[in-house]
Image (tube, rainbow, N blue to C red):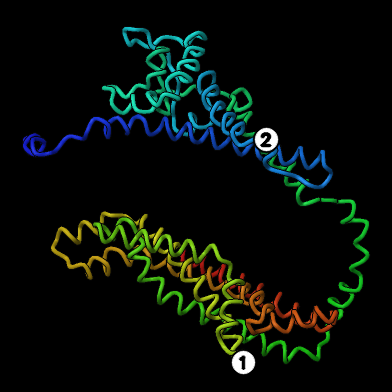
Amino acid sequence: MANKEYYADFIKPKPRWLASWDTVKPRSLAFLTDAGFAALLLLVATYFFTRVITGGEGSFLVMPWWALLVIVVEVPVVWQSFGISLGMRALGLRLIVVDPQDRPRRTVIVPRFLRVLAWHISIPLLIGIIWPLVSRDARSLHGRLSHTQLVGVSPEQVKKTAWYRTSSGLATVLLCVVILAAGVSITKINLKTLFTEASNSTLVWRGLFSPEWSEFAEGLELLMVTIFMAFMATLFAVIVAAPLSFFAARNLFRGKLGRVVYTFLRVATSVIRSIEPIVWAIIFVVIVTPRRAAFAGVLALFLHSIADLTKLYSERLESIDPGPVEAITATGGSKSQVIQYGIVPQILTPYLSFTLYRWDINVRMATIIGALGGGGIGQMLIQYTRLWDWERAGMLILLIIATVWIMDYVSGRLRAHLE
């Protein structure tokens, strides 16, 4: 205790605005959450109803932008004043009414109306935004004028209420219904057509169930190319992703330089993963020579696997037990010994499991990449389907099905054994 009191004299206290921001931040996030909900609900509902009215052409924005902005801002203000909004529920906030002596009492309706009115007076003048950051208790000006306050509550203090009796629960259901209705309208789902026009695919099914067995040898050879495409991409990706994951783990790579490297790797892997392997395959097919189509597929899977495995590996590193690491460090162990004896035993099994799972994905993805010129069995399959040669295509599909099933079974057993 003496040491804490001694060091406390040298700790510089936070500025008032920064200390107040810790209290204002959850209220701001709650407001932005409710504003985002209102914007999403309004845009999707507008698109759906305009699509129904026009019979095919929909629009997300039919009202002036300023009218949309007013609605998006007004909804959180009214919702938080008269109910428990999604943002309040997510951030653990509740609105209480406080009398002039700062004693909480039961909520009444008049202060809630005053809160909405005071908000419209203080916020447009920017006083309501600056006031909480400079006031001693971080209370907003409209909250002070209406004797109300948004405060954090613990889960034990929250009264259990059925979801259908809360405004946030009903709002969530409304949003889901509107999104579902808009989705059905946009994708033009028609189950009647699905069942009445199914006979048009008779020729396709007849060819698939009557495979051309003379294609077995060539199909097996192309299948081996596909499997090794996935194997080589996964192998090289592991070699790169395993060390990168240590730099992408927040709990291991610290300091200013570590934060820069961590942020860069996270952003880079997110960007690479957001671009589908098919797009990468098209890019690499253009770069490499046509005779090396399989190499283009390997490069596409390799790049995407690095980003995916780095994310999976680093997240596992961030969840390791710090006890062994601290114990080895306390006994004077070097960084290499900490990694070897404190970290590797905790991540070895999950890393192997993630690697097997990624190889399983790459085998399936290699077939699709091959269809776009990336080599392997997929390239031949797309050629047969374009020629409507469903007998030969059926032989290749049977080989793919068998391979995927075997891979699922083997990788599943291996993962179960590792776990």
Image point (45%, 64%), residue name: 269
Q: Which mark is residue 325?
A: none
Mark 2 or 1, closer to the camera? 2
Are the two marked residues, 2 and 1, in contact with CB atoms closer than 8 angstroms? no
Kindly indicate the quadrant of the structure image that contains residue 79. Answer: top right
The quadrant in which the N terminus is found is top left
Q: Is residue 84 left or right of residue 99?
A: right
Residue 169 locus on image (x, y percent): 60, 30
Q: Amino acid at mark 2?
A: Met
Q: Is residue 402 left or right of residue 239?
A: right
At label 1, counting other C-alpha atoms closer than 10 Å, the crowd grade (few under 14, some 14-19, many 20 or more) is few
Kindly indicate the quadrant of the structure image that contains residue 29. Answer: top left
- Position of 82 relative to 217 (above/below): above
List the residue tagged with mark 2: 63
Residue 213 locus on image (x, y percent): 81, 88
Kindly indicate the quadrant of the structure image that contains residue 69. Answer: top right
List the residue tagged with mark 1: 291
Image point (84%, 79%), residue name: 390
Residue 191 locus on image (x, y percent): 85, 51
User: SS at mark 2?
Assistant: loop
Residue 189 or residue 52, whichever sits in front: 52
Residue 396 or residue 299, whichever sits in front: 299
Q: Is residue 228 left or right of residue 219?
A: left
- Position of 319 relative to 139 (above/below): below
Of the two numbered discs 2 and 1 on the same chain, state the one appearing first in sequence. Answer: 2
Image point (78%, 82%), residue name: 395
Q: Amino acid at mark 1?
A: Arg
